Amino acid sequence: MTSPDHWLKLERQVHFGDTDAAGVMHFHQLLRWCHEAWEESLERYGIAAGSVFPGCRGQQRWPAVALPVVHCQADFKRPVHGSDRLQVHLKPQRLDPGCFEVRSEFHLDATVMACGLVRHLAIHSDSRERCALPETVDLWLEASALGQITSL
């Protein structure tokens, strides 16, 4: 089995288009980066995008469970500039059988530059009623927590 670092520690190159007129990361980019890092993490773990996200090319039908974002937050610690190469550390956590969140920390060398959090809730795609997380996402959460001590 691959180490969780393989899918929980990623890199992000900051491009000119990610910045504002002052050359600093535009605020809305952080939450997009958080979601993209989560998508990349799932892919690295071995979960196909089409099994989680609707609208993927070649998808015969949409996933039975949707994972809408129900909460997000962003904290900016230091300016992030174009051409910065950031390390992205993901910290997923299951909150209950149908809800989880992914905390993302963006580092430049040893300095935390920004942090984000995105919380998802599992709902049946048809009825929109709450339900359990898809098995693949549940396994990703479980594997991501291996070796970590959690409070009771």
Image: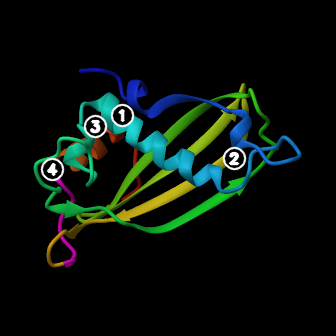
The three-letter code of the residue at mark 3 reads Ala
Where does the magenta region start and end? 128-135
**Residue for badge 2:** 114
Dot placed on the residue nearer the N-terminal end, 2 or 4 = 2
> Closer to us: mark 1 or mark 4?
4
Q: Tag on residue 143?
A: 3
Membership of 129 in magenta stretch:
yes
Dot placed on the residue nearer the N-terminal end, 3 or 4 = 4
Outermost residue, top side: 2
Q: Quick one: SS at disc 4?
A: helix
Query: Do the CB atoms of the residues marked 3 and 1 lie less than 8 Å apart?
Result: no
Image quarter where the N terminus lies is top left
Q: At x 74% / y 26%, what residue is drawn? A: 83
Outermost residue, right side: 22
Q: At x 69% / y 46%, what residue is drawn? A: 114
The answer to which quarter of the image holds residue 100 is bottom left
Dot placed on the residue nearer the N-terminal end, 1 or 2 = 2
Give the CA distance from mark 2 to mark 4: 31 Å
- The answer to whether residue 132 is above or below residue 9 is below
Q: Tag on residue 135?
A: 4
